[in-house]
Image (cartoon, rainbow, N blue to C red):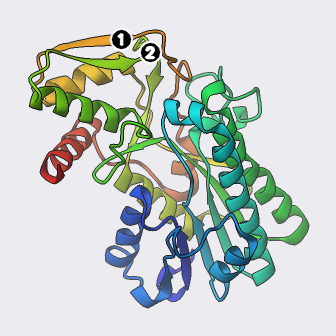
Amino acid sequence: MINLKDKKILVTGADGFLGKHLVANLLEKRNVPKEHLFLPTAQDLDLTKWENCVKAVAGQDIVIHLAAKVGGIGFNQEKPGELFYDNIMMGVQLMEAARQAGVKKFVAIGTVCAYPKHTPVPFREEDLWNGYPEETNAAYGLAKKMLLTQSQAYRQQYGFNSIFLLPLNLYGPGDNFDLKSSHVVAALIKKVYEAKRDGKDHIEVWGTGKATRGFLYVEDVAEGILLATEKYDKSEPVNLGTNLEISIKDLAELICKLMDFKGEIRWDSVKPDGQPRRSLDVTRAKQEFSFVAETDFTEGLKKTIAWYIETT
């Protein structure tokens, strides 16, 4: 087991939604001295450029690569080229720079979008290569999936200690609530809040509501990533999530109930549903590094809603 207190750690994307919670965990739960953390923003270092990757990893013991260009279905449809290029260039170059610099461990964060469109539910890591991802997020999913290929190739050829984690859809306080790029939980909370504020009798939601998703509270995924950083040193990918599977229809109704919105939910079935079903088998994470998500979904939603209302 790695004692993180003694290590110099680069966290990319540290100022993002997940990054802020992971850094807080490092400082408060694991008592890592702040001076041991290097937390460059995208403005500080554009990691699509090789020379910035070299600067970022210099002198570091561990790299936790959270930085990513991400968004919901609409954003994925609008900017697939950017999503592919930026994510693949950041990841591939950062891992190569880390290898050249003698970094002791590289933690690559993938995405559940890397799974094939019609993966048997719950998704098992063994099924990751059994088909092409859902079309609306394929560019993003495949760009992140290449980090798994690179990670395994570098372990085989160079003995480089790199691991690859696949987190479920995240939600929680500090999420991105911009409707142009937000994911479904944040988008629904914002739509309901604004409908109540403006006295509207309905909200409009993309798709049919039939697609299913699982969700992982952001503090839980931060803990899962750090447990893997401390304890996991194998080439096989690992899911981080819960066994929750809820339809978008049920999710929308639950959020309306929690926010006391009595209006109608109107489904725009011309818009895509995305992947038909999504739920993870989380056995490997529990077996390998004792990760079990602790936050009840309804309680996590309440916390997220309260945070949004307080900060809006």
Q: Is residue 107 left or right of residue 97?
A: left
Amino acid type shown at disc 1: Trp
Secondary structure beneath dot 2 equals loop
Q: Observer-nearest residue: 111 or 165?
A: 111
Q: Is residue 134 visible?
A: no
Residue most toward the right?
A: 157
Q: Is residue 183 visible?
A: yes
Secondary structure beneath dot 1 equals strand
Could you tell me how many numbered marks the image carries? 2
Quadrant of the rendered image containing residue 203: top left
Numbered badge on residue 78: none
Which residue sits at x=35%, y=19%? 205
**x then y, percent, for residue 303:** 20, 46
Which residue sits at x=36%, y=63%? 21
Q: CA distance from mark 2 to mark 1?
A: 6 Å
Q: Is residue 127 above or below residue 309?
A: above
Q: Are marks 2 and 1 in contact (CB under 8 Å)?
A: yes
Q: Is residue 239 left or right of residue 169?
A: right
Residue with the mark numbered 1 = 267
Q: Is residue 116 left or right of residue 283?
A: right
Residue with the mark numbered 2 = 207
**x then y, percent, for residue 6:** 51, 88
> Of callouts 2 and 1, which one flags the residue occurring earlier in the amino acid sequence?
2
